[in-house]
Amino acid sequence: MEWIENGDLSFLKKRKVEAKEAAQQSVREIIARVRDEGDKALKDYTKQFDGVELGELRVPNEAIAAAYRHVPEKVIQAIRQAAENIRAFHEKQKPSSWTETVEHGVVLGQKVTPLDSVGVYVPGGTASYPSSVLMGAVPALVAGVGRVVLISPPQKNGLIAYGVLVAAHEIGIKEIYQAGGAQAIAALAYGTETIRPVDKIVGPGNLYVMLAKKQVFGDVAIDSLAGPSEIAVLADETAHPEWVAADLLSQAEHDKMSMPVLVTTSRSLAEKVDQEVERQLPALPRHEIAGPSIETVGKIVLAANLKDAAEIVNQIAPEHLELAIADPESVLPLIRHAGAIFLGMYSSEPVGDYFAGPNHIIPTNGSARYASPLGVESFVKRSSLIRYTDEALEANGSAIADFARFEGLEGHAQAVEKRMKGATVHE
């Protein structure tokens, strides 16, 4: 891991992955073909990219039932408990409609309405991510979305990962399709003969998924344009070097471009963590992925004190932040920018990834400066309510008309004045 002792955080400018024009053009072509050819394009691309010849795009009920025979019972129980925790947490996020009556009998308010339909993309192919099913779909269900669709690429055996199917069934998702990559995003956005389009697409994916989400945005809503995973561990001399190293590696194994960063006030701890990372890395099954992340992106940043360390974290605005310090609550008020904050020595990042309840679909690439984790609010929209009375219009109409005329909108002014008793309408 590279050491930084002079406060130079210029490495942050390099973390955004820029797609080459060839990749962007490829995604444009995939989207256009799916719009034109529908199911045929999806099946052709699945054969080309995943090496699987599909019969039906929709996963049959018998395949879901069969999936339970391939997932260990202890994992099924973990999925159920995680789903319960995630649902309980997100229930507390539900926004409410409201109205109030103010001067002159004016009624103002807000109407909260869930989206009609949402598509949840779950990565797959070489891995199984039932946690992504829960994190993408449960808040949508809590919000009251009427139609929640899941789409995921098939594995080499021609089926979506068993764990994904089990997680989907456990939370009641009935509409599941086999397709991945940019073509799956296009199908959700524009529909095919089999797949009806949705209003919003959520979920992580590779570069091509991200580019597809970017290109369909505007025709549908999306959650975010996610980049490689990130973790910052803010640690003092009380932290356990072995634990901190394990947490850094837990993110490094996601992707060669994942960014693990240790920010610490203790040089001694930094040296021990650096050694621990080198010791633990070879034993990881995904060491060929974690290694480049540690070597080319990983950083150890020394800070003079906890206040400076907190400000360094704010500049990083990490997806995940662990406060591995003796008194994490004392530093928490100094943290302004982080997607998810883990407090204390036992709050390892995977606790949030899988089980605790908060969402693991979190802003990356520094977007925690202005964005929030996926939540119930991501699946509802708000309508403003305005009810003016005759009395209110008489009291305020002249001011409204004056404002409109100042902006050069005579029609706006007249629309108010025609309703006012004794008002002079300038026609």
Image (cartoon, rainbow, N blue to C red):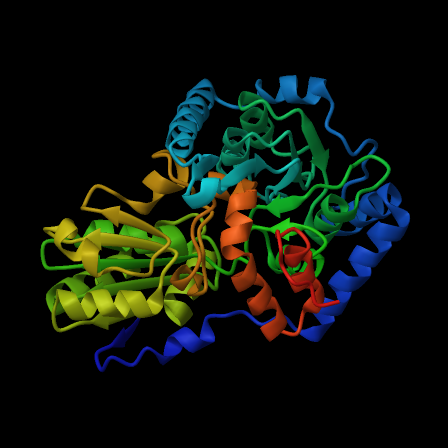
Q: Is residue 427 visible?
A: yes
The residue at the point 51 percent across, 56 percent down is 396
The residue at the point 62 percent across, 38 percent down is 115
The spot of residue 119 in percent (x, y) is 65, 40
Q: Quadrant of the C terminus?
A: bottom right
- Examine the rendered structure and indicate whether residue 109 appears above or below residue 15: above
Q: Is residue 385 visible?
A: no
The spot of residue 383 in percent (x, y) is 57, 44
The residue at the point 10 percent across, 51 percent down is 326
The residue at the point 81 percent across, 62 percent down is 29
Q: Return the residue nearer the eye: 262 or 89.
A: 89
- Name the quadrant containing residue 274: bottom left
Task: Report the side of 23 relative to 205 (left or right).
Answer: right
Q: Return the residue nearer the eye: 78 or 158.
A: 78
The spot of residue 142 in percent (x, y) is 50, 30
Task: Report the side of 28 relative to 276 (left or right).
Answer: right
The spot of residue 222 in percent (x, y) is 61, 51
Counting the numbered discs, the total is: 0
Q: Quadrant of the N terminus?
A: bottom left
- Examine the rendered structure and indicate whether residue 169 appears above or below residue 32: above
- Name the quadrant containing residue 169: top right
- Examine the rendered structure and indicate whether residue 147 appears above or below residue 28: above
